[in-house]
Image (spheres, rainbow, N blue to C red):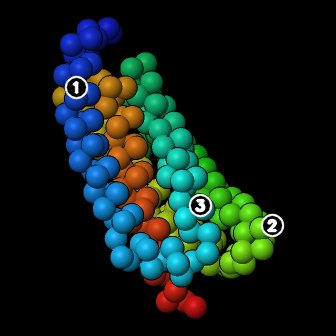
Amino acid sequence: MPGHDSARDIYRQAVPVITVSLIAGLFAGTILASDAMRANIAEVPGLLLLLPAFLATRGGVYGSLGARLSTGLHQGIIEPRFQPDRRLTNAVVASFLNGMTVSVFIAVVTYATLVLFGDGGSLFQLVGVMVVAGFLSAVLMITVLIAVIFLGYRRGLDPDNVIGPVVTTLGDVFGVFFLLIGVAAVGALS
Protein backbone atom coordinates (compact mmCIF):
# COMPACT_ATOMS: atom_id res chain seq x y z
CA MET A 1 0.00 0.00 0.00
CA PRO A 2 1.46 3.39 -0.95
CA GLY A 3 2.49 5.62 1.92
CA HIS A 4 0.73 8.77 0.73
CA ASP A 5 -2.79 8.83 -0.66
CA SER A 6 -3.81 11.59 -2.99
CA ALA A 7 -6.88 13.66 -2.21
CA ARG A 8 -8.63 11.77 -5.01
CA ASP A 9 -7.78 8.39 -3.44
CA ILE A 10 -9.03 9.51 -0.04
CA TYR A 11 -12.23 10.83 -1.59
CA ARG A 12 -12.75 7.65 -3.64
CA GLN A 13 -12.33 5.47 -0.57
CA ALA A 14 -14.34 7.58 1.87
CA VAL A 15 -17.40 8.63 -0.18
CA PRO A 16 -19.02 5.17 -0.44
CA VAL A 17 -18.61 4.62 3.30
CA ILE A 18 -19.94 8.08 4.11
CA THR A 19 -22.94 7.47 1.82
CA VAL A 20 -23.75 4.23 3.63
CA SER A 21 -23.27 6.09 6.92
CA LEU A 22 -25.78 8.74 5.86
CA ILE A 23 -28.43 6.16 4.96
CA ALA A 24 -27.78 4.19 8.15
CA GLY A 25 -27.96 7.39 10.21
CA LEU A 26 -31.43 8.03 8.83
CA PHE A 27 -32.33 4.47 9.83
CA ALA A 28 -31.04 5.14 13.37
CA GLY A 29 -33.27 8.22 13.50
CA THR A 30 -36.20 6.06 12.43
CA ILE A 31 -35.51 3.68 15.32
CA LEU A 32 -35.20 6.61 17.70
CA ALA A 33 -38.54 8.04 16.52
CA SER A 34 -40.32 4.67 16.70
CA ASP A 35 -43.21 3.98 19.04
CA ALA A 36 -41.10 1.31 20.77
CA MET A 37 -38.36 3.81 21.59
CA ARG A 38 -40.86 6.40 22.77
CA ALA A 39 -42.46 3.83 25.05
CA ASN A 40 -39.05 2.85 26.45
CA ILE A 41 -38.11 6.47 27.03
CA ALA A 42 -41.32 6.90 29.02
CA GLU A 43 -40.81 3.58 30.86
CA VAL A 44 -37.15 4.05 31.84
CA PRO A 45 -36.42 7.37 33.53
CA GLY A 46 -33.05 8.62 32.36
CA LEU A 47 -32.91 6.68 29.09
CA LEU A 48 -33.07 9.82 26.99
CA LEU A 49 -30.50 11.45 29.29
CA LEU A 50 -27.92 8.69 28.80
CA LEU A 51 -28.51 8.17 25.07
CA PRO A 52 -26.15 10.91 23.74
CA ALA A 53 -23.34 9.89 26.09
CA PHE A 54 -23.76 6.22 25.18
CA LEU A 55 -23.65 6.91 21.44
CA ALA A 56 -20.71 9.32 21.74
CA THR A 57 -18.62 6.89 23.75
CA ARG A 58 -19.13 4.12 21.19
CA GLY A 59 -17.27 6.33 18.72
CA GLY A 60 -14.58 7.27 21.21
CA VAL A 61 -13.84 3.78 22.50
CA TYR A 62 -14.09 1.87 19.24
CA GLY A 63 -12.67 4.68 17.11
CA SER A 64 -9.53 4.33 19.24
CA LEU A 65 -9.50 0.61 18.50
CA GLY A 66 -9.83 1.33 14.78
CA ALA A 67 -7.01 3.86 14.91
CA ARG A 68 -4.76 1.48 16.85
CA LEU A 69 -5.37 -1.33 14.35
CA SER A 70 -4.86 0.98 11.39
CA THR A 71 -1.57 2.24 12.82
CA GLY A 72 -0.46 -1.32 13.54
CA LEU A 73 -1.19 -2.33 9.95
CA HIS A 74 0.65 0.68 8.54
CA GLN A 75 3.66 0.00 10.75
CA GLY A 76 3.63 -3.71 9.93
CA ILE A 77 3.28 -4.81 13.56
CA ILE A 78 -0.20 -6.25 13.01
CA GLU A 79 -0.92 -8.55 10.10
CA PRO A 80 -4.30 -8.28 8.36
CA ARG A 81 -5.21 -11.86 9.25
CA PHE A 82 -7.83 -13.31 11.52
CA GLN A 83 -5.34 -15.09 13.74
CA PRO A 84 -4.54 -14.72 17.41
CA ASP A 85 -1.97 -12.00 17.89
CA ARG A 86 -0.85 -10.47 21.18
CA ARG A 87 -1.18 -6.86 20.01
CA LEU A 88 -4.57 -7.46 18.44
CA THR A 89 -5.81 -9.34 21.50
CA ASN A 90 -4.59 -6.61 23.87
CA ALA A 91 -6.25 -3.89 21.79
CA VAL A 92 -9.54 -5.81 21.65
CA VAL A 93 -9.57 -6.63 25.38
CA ALA A 94 -8.74 -3.03 26.31
CA SER A 95 -11.50 -1.70 24.05
CA PHE A 96 -14.02 -4.18 25.44
CA LEU A 97 -13.16 -3.30 29.05
CA ASN A 98 -13.21 0.43 28.29
CA GLY A 99 -16.58 0.10 26.54
CA MET A 100 -18.13 -1.82 29.42
CA THR A 101 -16.65 0.44 32.09
CA VAL A 102 -17.82 3.62 30.41
CA SER A 103 -21.29 2.09 29.89
CA VAL A 104 -21.69 1.41 33.61
CA PHE A 105 -20.23 4.83 34.43
CA ILE A 106 -22.81 6.51 32.18
CA ALA A 107 -25.60 4.64 33.98
CA VAL A 108 -24.29 5.70 37.41
CA VAL A 109 -23.88 9.35 36.39
CA THR A 110 -27.36 9.32 34.84
CA TYR A 111 -28.84 7.89 38.04
CA ALA A 112 -26.98 10.48 40.15
CA THR A 113 -28.32 13.23 37.89
CA LEU A 114 -31.86 11.91 38.24
CA VAL A 115 -31.54 11.77 42.04
CA LEU A 116 -30.01 15.25 42.14
CA PHE A 117 -32.93 16.72 40.22
CA GLY A 118 -35.54 14.61 42.03
CA ASP A 119 -36.69 12.68 38.98
CA GLY A 120 -36.37 9.20 40.50
CA GLY A 121 -35.20 6.29 38.44
CA SER A 122 -33.66 2.93 39.20
CA LEU A 123 -29.91 2.35 39.39
CA PHE A 124 -30.45 -1.38 38.76
CA GLN A 125 -32.52 -0.67 35.69
CA LEU A 126 -30.08 1.86 34.21
CA VAL A 127 -27.00 -0.26 34.89
CA GLY A 128 -28.76 -3.35 33.52
CA VAL A 129 -29.78 -1.59 30.32
CA MET A 130 -26.28 -0.21 29.84
CA VAL A 131 -24.55 -3.54 30.54
CA VAL A 132 -26.70 -5.30 27.94
CA ALA A 133 -26.38 -2.49 25.38
CA GLY A 134 -22.68 -2.02 26.09
CA PHE A 135 -21.92 -5.73 25.76
CA LEU A 136 -23.88 -6.17 22.54
CA SER A 137 -22.38 -3.06 20.98
CA ALA A 138 -18.86 -4.12 22.03
CA VAL A 139 -19.18 -7.54 20.45
CA LEU A 140 -20.67 -6.16 17.24
CA MET A 141 -18.34 -3.20 16.88
CA ILE A 142 -15.15 -5.12 17.62
CA THR A 143 -16.10 -7.88 15.19
CA VAL A 144 -17.15 -5.56 12.37
CA LEU A 145 -14.23 -3.17 12.87
CA ILE A 146 -11.66 -5.94 12.65
CA ALA A 147 -13.36 -7.38 9.57
CA VAL A 148 -13.70 -4.02 7.79
CA ILE A 149 -10.16 -2.93 8.63
CA PHE A 150 -8.49 -6.20 7.66
CA LEU A 151 -10.54 -6.89 4.53
CA GLY A 152 -10.32 -3.27 3.39
CA TYR A 153 -6.57 -3.18 3.96
CA ARG A 154 -6.09 -6.37 1.97
CA ARG A 155 -8.05 -4.80 -0.88
CA GLY A 156 -5.87 -1.71 -0.89
CA LEU A 157 -8.05 0.62 1.17
CA ASP A 158 -6.46 2.80 3.80
CA PRO A 159 -8.32 2.06 7.07
CA ASP A 160 -7.81 5.67 8.14
CA ASN A 161 -10.11 6.75 5.30
CA VAL A 162 -13.03 4.50 6.19
CA ILE A 163 -12.93 3.72 9.90
CA GLY A 164 -14.48 6.97 11.17
CA PRO A 165 -17.77 6.63 9.27
CA VAL A 166 -17.92 2.91 10.04
CA VAL A 167 -17.54 3.50 13.78
CA THR A 168 -20.09 6.30 13.96
CA THR A 169 -22.61 4.41 11.84
CA LEU A 170 -22.34 1.20 13.84
CA GLY A 171 -22.43 3.10 17.12
CA ASP A 172 -25.50 5.14 16.19
CA VAL A 173 -27.60 2.49 14.47
CA PHE A 174 -26.85 -0.42 16.72
CA GLY A 175 -26.42 1.66 19.88
CA VAL A 176 -30.03 2.80 19.70
CA PHE A 177 -31.20 -0.70 18.79
CA PHE A 178 -29.19 -2.32 21.60
CA LEU A 179 -30.64 0.14 24.12
CA LEU A 180 -34.08 -1.16 23.12
CA ILE A 181 -32.87 -4.72 23.64
CA GLY A 182 -31.38 -3.71 27.01
CA VAL A 183 -34.68 -2.21 28.15
CA ALA A 184 -36.52 -5.37 27.07
CA ALA A 185 -33.99 -7.65 28.80
CA VAL A 186 -34.05 -5.71 32.06
CA GLY A 187 -37.83 -5.46 31.89
CA ALA A 188 -38.03 -9.25 31.57
CA LEU A 189 -35.92 -9.60 34.74
CA SER A 190 -38.08 -7.16 36.75
Residue that mark 2 sits on: 116
Instruction: Name the amino acid, label 1.
Output: Gln
In terms of depth relative to the viewer, which is nearer, 140 or 58?
Answer: 58
Instruction: Name the amino acid, label 3.
Output: Leu
Q: Is residue 90 above or below residue 139?
A: above
Residue that mark 3 sits on: 50
156 vs 74, left or right, is left
Question: To which quarter of the image does residue 127 belong?
Answer: bottom right
Q: Is residue 179 visible?
A: yes
Q: Is residue 9 above or below residue 177?
A: above
Question: To which quarter of the image does residue 106 belong?
Answer: bottom right
Q: Position of residue 164 (x, y in %)?
A: 39, 34
Secondary structure beneath disc 2? helix
User: At 52% from the left edge and 78% from the top edge, which residue is drawn?
Assistant: 42
Q: Position of residue 159 (x, y in %)?
A: 33, 28
Labelled disc at residue 13 = 1
Instruction: Name the amino acid, label 2.
Output: Leu
| Label 2, residues with CA under 10 Å away: few <14, some 14-19, many ≥20 | few
Spatial distance from mark 2 to mark 3, Cα to Cα?
Answer: 15 Å
Secondary structure beneath disc 3? helix
| Label 1, residues with CA under 10 Å away: few <14, some 14-19, many ≥20 | some
User: At 72% from the left edge and 78% from the top edge, which residue is drawn?
Assistant: 120
Spatial distance from mark 2 to mark 1, Cα to Cα?
Answer: 47 Å
In terms of depth relative to the viewer, which is nearer, 132 or 86?
Answer: 132
In terms of depth relative to the viewer, which is nearer, 187 or 136?
Answer: 187
- For marks 3 and 1, the one nearer the N-term is 1
- For marks 2 and 1, the one nearer the N-term is 1
| Label 3, residues with CA under 10 Å away: few <14, some 14-19, many ≥20 | some
Spatial distance from mark 3 to mark 1, Cα to Cα?
Answer: 33 Å
31 vs 90, left or right, is left
Labelled disc at residue 96 = none
Q: Is residue 142 above or below residue 35?
A: above
